[in-house]
Image (cartoon, helix red, strand yellow):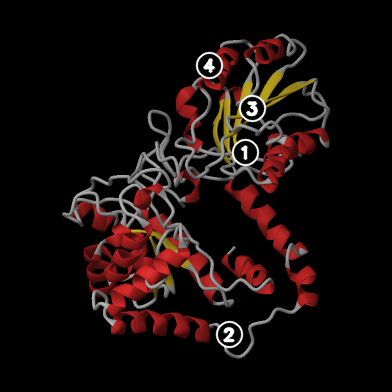
């Protein structure tokens, strides 16, 4: 995946990707990392991050490990507020910092900071890691030995703006040791503030020169001083090529995880199955979130009932849908709740949770597929079948449809534990139908 990302990015003139996320998602309530993480095991996160970094950088795309020193144990979104990470030094070394050390060992060329507060690392109350010399300069640069680019997360996020204005935040970030200030709310104000801080001696000119050198060296390492233009005729050949699409298909199919299959409900028999197909989105305007899934299922068989709902769908429509599934032998439900900055939660709408609980008490089997957070199962542990596809992408929806009817095997494992339900590493192997 790193190679594919690099080849397509360079084809359209992109030289730096703000990936991979190396946060260890140990908090099921995390509203902004969640499925962006490789999982809850630091070793697994590190291993997969290293592979992605190598794939990118061996094919001309700079990778960025984020969000330093680790955003995985937060229940708040730094786009809105300043989250607090309570782990002690021993825990931080073992969990949060481990993937970053391994990313550095793999030669990652950039690291992005997090707007989070860690009292174990920074004694100044409510000082974000992004603006902390102890965390950026002393820990990341000096103790961990990182020589590459340090870039802030977006400076317009609430984790910074609730506490500091644009000018002060920019000055503090440079003094902390960052090289690149990303998306300040007022770029001209940030630039002027840093220039004036240098002129009055608050920031040494040598400090600016050090960052400029790192940026120029990064550009030179990509060969941009020799050629910075793209081959327009090559774009159609490289982007979304048959090879790349096949790799994406394989990735989605192999990651699909069967967590529960009570009564061996799946794989469904496409010759005889009578299904009601529902897609429930907790996002406003997400009414058509599951269209790729519906289309993929309809290519295999015609459902006896199709129902779509999103955050705007009225209660009456849902109650009506319940009366229209009498002919169905199985109810298949696709769940959608997108990770989005400032949303505050990635969980399901309470009324959808109650709906699934109600359906699971009826005699016909209920198959639930999460195209988002794997943690949804905590709300309705009695459903017959629970599959995790982890992503909204149409390729994930197509893979889930194929697996549902046994056209491909299901071999994935949970990268996180589902509290009170199943441990990390759990996954049922479902063989395809003959």
Q: Nearer the viewer, mark 1 or mark 4?
A: 4
Disc number lying in front (3 or 1): 3
Query: Do residues under tags 2 and 3 come within 8 Å of each other at their CB atoms?
Result: no
* Residue of label 1: 430
| 3 or 1: tag closer to the N-terminus | 3
Q: Secondary structure at mark 2?
A: loop
- Answer with left or right where residue 99 lies relative to residue 237: left
Dot 4 falls on a residue whose secondary structure is helix
Mark 2 or mark 4, which is nearer the start of the sequence?
A: 2
Foreground mark, 2 or 1, reads 2
Q: Which residue is mark 4?
A: 354
User: Mark 4, mark 2: which one is toward the viewer?
Assistant: 2
Q: Nearer the viewer, residue 148 or 25?
A: 148
Classify 10 Å Cα crowding around label 4: few (below 14), some (14-19), many (20 and above).
few
Q: CA distance from mark 2 to mark 1?
A: 48 Å
Against 263, is 80 above or below? below
The residues tagged by marks 4 and 3 sit, at their Cα atoms, a distance apart of 15 Å
Q: Residues within 10 Å of mark 2 (few under 14, many from 20)?
A: few
**Mark 4 or 3: the one toward you:** 3
Residues marked 3 and 1 touching at CB (< 8 Å): no
403 or 77: which is nearer to us?
77
Q: Are marks 4 and 3 in contact (CB under 8 Å)?
A: no
Left or right: 1 in relation to 159:
right
In the picture of the structure, the residue carrying the numbered disc 3 is 310
- Relative vertical location of residue 124 with respect to residue 378 in this rendering, above or below: below
Q: Would residue 97 be visible to someone looking at this image?
A: no
Instruction: Relative to 321, say whether 333 is above or below.
Output: below
Which mark identifies residue 325?
A: none
| Earlier sequence position, callout 1 versus callout 4 | 4
Q: Earlier in the sequence, mark 2 or mark 3?
A: 2
Image quadrant in which you'd find residue 97: bottom left
Mark 2, residue position: 224
């Amino acid at each position: 995946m790193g190679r594919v990302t690099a080849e397509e990015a360079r084809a359209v003139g992109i030289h730096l990707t703000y990936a991979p996320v190396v946060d260890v998602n140990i908090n099921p309530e995390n509203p902004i990392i969640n499925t962006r993480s490789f999982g809850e095991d630091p070793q697994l996160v590190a291993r997969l991050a290293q592979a992605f970094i190598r794939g990118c950088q061996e094919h001309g795309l700079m990778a960025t490990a984020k969000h330093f020193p680790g955003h995985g144990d937060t229940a708040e979104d730094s786009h809105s507020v300043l989250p607090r990470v309570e782990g002690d030094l021993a825990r931080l070394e073992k969990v949060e910092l481990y993937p970053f050390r391994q990313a550095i060992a793999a030669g990652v060329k950039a690291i992005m900071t997090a707007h989070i507060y860690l009292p174990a690392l920074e004694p100044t109350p409510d000082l974000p890691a992004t603006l902390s010399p102890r965390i950026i300069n002393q820990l990341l640069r000096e103790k961990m030995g990182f020589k590459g680019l340090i870039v802030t997360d977006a400076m317009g996020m609430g984790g910074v703006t609730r506490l500091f204005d644009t000018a002060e935040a920019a000055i503090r970030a440079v003094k902390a040791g960052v090289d690149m200030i990303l998306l300040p709310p007022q770029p001209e104000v940030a630039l002027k503030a840093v220039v004036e801080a240098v002129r009055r001696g608050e920031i040494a000119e040598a400090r600016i020169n050090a960052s400029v050198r790192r940026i120029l060296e990064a550009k030179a390492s990509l060969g941009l001083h020799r050629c910075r233009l793209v081959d327009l005729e090559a774009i159609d050949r490289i982007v979304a090529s048959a090879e790349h699409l096949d790799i994406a298909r394989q990735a989605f199919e192999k990651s699909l995880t069967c967590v529960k299959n009570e009564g061996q409900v799946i794989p469904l028999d496409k010759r005889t199955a009578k299904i009601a197909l529902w897609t429930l989105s907790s996002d406003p305007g997400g009414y058509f979130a599951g269209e790729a899934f519906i289309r993929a299922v309809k290519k295999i068989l015609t459902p006896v009932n199709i129902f779509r709902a999103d955050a705007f769908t009225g209660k009456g429509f849902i109650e009506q849908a319940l009366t229209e599934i009498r002919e169905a032998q199985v109810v298949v439900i696709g769940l959608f709740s997108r990770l989005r900055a400032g949303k505050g939660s990635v969980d399901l709408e309470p009324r959808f949770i109650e709906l699934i609980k109600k359906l699971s008490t009826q005699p016909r089997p209920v198959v639930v597929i999460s195209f988002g957070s794997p943690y949804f199962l905590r709300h309705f542990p009695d459903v017959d079948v629970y599959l995790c596809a982890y992503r909204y992408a149409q390729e994930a929806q197509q893979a889930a449809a194929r697996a549902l009817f046994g056209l491909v095997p299901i071999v994935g494992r949970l990268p996180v534990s589902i509290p009170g339900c199943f441990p990390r590493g759990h996954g049922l192997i479902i063989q395809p139908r003959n």
